[in-house]
Amino acid sequence: MRTRDIWRRQPRLLRIVLIRLALIVPQMFGVTLVAFLLIRLLPGDPARLILGNFATDESIALYREKLGLDKDVWTQFAIYVGNILKGDFGTSPFTSRPILEDLADRAPATLELILYAVICTVGLGVTIAVVSVVKRGSPFDWGARIYGFAAGALPDFLVALLLVFVFFYLLGWAPAPFGRLDLMLNTPPQVTGFLTIDSLIAGDFEAFRSAAGRLILPVLTITIVNAGAVTKMAHSVFSEIWDSPIVGHMRACGVPEQQIVRAALRNSLPPIISVSSFILGFLLGAAVLVETIFSWGGLGQYAVQAVINSDYAALQGFVLVASAFILVVYSVADILYEVVDPRIRT
Amino acid sequence: MNAPVADPAAAPTGPSGEGAIVVLDKLSVGFGDRTVLNGIDLALRPREIFGIVGETGAGKSVLARAIIGLLPPGGDVTGGAVRYRGRPLDAFSPAEAGSYRGGKVALIGTNAKALLDPVARVGDQIARVVRAHTPMDARAARTRAIDLMREVGIVEPERRARAYPHELSGGMAQRIVIAMALAGNPEVLLADDATLGLDATVQAQVLESLVERSRDRGLSVLLITHDLGIVRHYCDRVAVIRDGRLVEEGPVGDFMAAPATGYSRDLLDAARARPALQAPLAAGDRPPLVDVRDLTMHFAVPGSVLPIKAVDGISFAIAPGETLALVGESGSGKTTAGQCLMRLIDNTDGRIFFDGRDVTDLKDRAFRPLRRHMQMVFQEPYVALNPRWRVADLLAEPLALVEPMTAAERARRVAELLALVHLDPRLADVRPHALTAGEQKRVGIARALATRPRFIVFDEPTTALDIRVRAQIIDLIRGLQSSMNLSALFITHDLNSVRSLAHRVAVMHLGKIVEQGDTEAIFERAEHPYTRKLLAAELPVDAEPAAAAP
């Protein structure tokens, strides 16, 4: 009872954050286990695969011993976890580099892309939803409905190619779809891995312009494709609140319309947070077509390469990093969700 | 005060010589081709409290919304106008309309908990309204909000201002809504069934403080209600509305003494009705059908160390054919007790005997055959009825569970059940949303009767019903009681509704039964102060001569 009392007396925010942090540990352990078992489930003996058809049984047995395959599954798992904790994800036979280095090179590219994309997607989707609810029945509302209906059916590669065709090829406004930075420029020293931020830290405005310019089309692509779903969801949540007695009462009290919109939006936040976190997690792998078209060199492309090359160690590394990322995103979303809704008890 | 009103309806109403503030001039409101208000003429004078009485669907709420200029979607003023100090509302610019709402005329709605923003602190919500009408910085607005909360009778307003609506009781939330209405310093308050659904004692307190504030500030109040006791107690003048038309209007004293129309007389008679007290059942040596001993139900609360003691060791017994009324205010644990009795939730302690058998620890499987003998009529009929089913299906469902029968037999039983609760057999084919609240209650009761039970728990069967419908439901239950020899537990917060129905009454307060006895004893010689307080909270339609009529 006493520890419980002490716990109850802590500020609500602290309790929410501590609970979420404590949950991350077992969740991460579970993810690691799944990533490990995933590879174990694949058919074939790795030693035989690596040594080839002509290897003798003895050499295979020796090699199995070297790989640790002669030990039982749980010992192997313990070794695997130990290696990961040391930062050793293994080496990719195809890039001949430690997998962790490969991932660390590529992750910032994808993260920069999808973070900006999610901000734009949610911003645009929610804005469209709010305006179309407030101006219900207006041409804007109809346009928004048609967009919400059509956006889900647009393939991202098509949008990407159309944007490249119009803005690079026809109009010449956008830079060429070749990577994150003009090849003639030096990459700013890595601090965050985000070129837009690192270039500003380095005071290199030319690099910033190039990096930001090259982000525009891929971010626009992802935004156009995904904002429709956000619009639909935000529309249904927001319009429900907009028609509720809460808004009617605020209006009857003479509260200015702008403040009513703000309060209604505040009430619609929880599901918007959930959907944003979902899209962020989903884009980590799903942005691969966009990454490919813009030669982005991101995580998605790396994972596809790994699948094509049967590079299981790299794939395992990707799964682990992606899961960890999604876990962090969902945890943050959970915390925000509880923070914005005081009715949730903790 | 200014602008003489040209409207003839307002002219003869001003003995004080002051012009009316708000005038309805042959106001008609329609939703599509349905007319909800039909040529209403009304004038609200300064500093008067004007009661509007009518049953559900009469158009009272639409009237309030028309005055504030916010009709529900689909509603249009189809004729006439609302004038504020001589100016028609539709001539207001959007900015004027904004300061009119809340600044000149404020609306206090029903069910305060649904009106408050659930994710904002109540103090901030009041401050929001304050700032909408008077430009000031956030800090000053907060201080003003706390002053307003104190004014409407909230203790510890500084602390309460930081609460979220879900942390407040219904009465407290209603006071917050009143504070919001006062925040813009309006001249007119429209109270639209502002205390509906609150406990009688809380209702009295909230109304009292509302009226007191209005008198202090010299406000005019339009008090919309279906409770004639409230009108009798607080209003200067009254108007009766039926089906969107003004039936009659006049000073409350005259109205109470001699209503002009038959409809008003019916309403008054229904409100005055004090049916004879139910006599206790002839004492026999029959063992009780239901026997509850030390029933206890504690809920662990996340966020608190102490459990909520919803039901805290209550004991009662119900003989065959007897009706026990379990009376208490919301939060007293009466509904929880009913749910424990039906084994819908597992009580934490105490024993429940049904027909001499201890059913407390029976497994669901073993208990199920007993369920046909114990039924429950739920509080909110609309929520408890599957909206996608027709009435016939709703009634046939429990029948199918009891015994196999042919379609023809089932149809016959459904017709019997409908007849039993006095419903038109043609209603068998409609879905719940097409029924009135009273009809939904009847379907709920018919559903409970389908298995021919020996014991029924009625959970608040008369709340939120118009007074005439309430009387009909009580008559129905009383009829069933004697014709079927039913035992019943009648859970209600309305003490007076049980006087003709219950053989015995148990008064519940904070999880405990504070007083229990024959109905007559409770009504005539209540001993516990809480029982007396409950009895006194209802506003009588016929006041003692001492309370001077206006």
Image (cartoon, coloured by chain):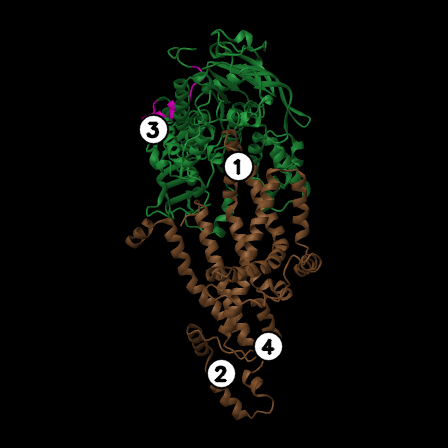
Chain colours: A brown, B green
SS of the residue under disc 2: loop
In space, the residues marked 4 and 2 are separated at their CA atoms by 19 Å
Amino acid type of the residue tagged 2 in the rendering: Leu
Rounded to the nearest angstrom, the CA distance separating label 1 from label 3 is 48 Å
Above or below, A188 against B4 in this view is below
Q: CA distance from mark 2 to mark 1?
A: 66 Å
Residue at 43 percent of width and 22 percent of height: B277
**Which residue position holds label 1?**
A258
The chain letter under disc 3 is B
Badge 3 element: helix
Q: Which residue is mark 2?
A: A69
Is circle 1 on the same chain as circle 4? Answer: yes
| Relative side of B303 to A50, left or right | left
Q: Are marks 1 and 3 on the same chain?
A: no
For mark 4, what is the residue? A310
Residue range of the region highlighted in magenta in the rendering: B525-542
Disc 4 residue type (three-letter):
Ser
Read off the chain for label 4: A
Amino acid type of the residue that numbered disc 3 sits on in the rendered structure: Tyr
Is B71 situated above or below A67?
Answer: above
Which comes before the other along the chain, label 1 or label 4? 1
Labels 2 and 1: the sequence-earlier one: 2
Foreground: disc 1 or disc 3: 1
Q: Closer to the observer: label 4 or label 2?
A: 4
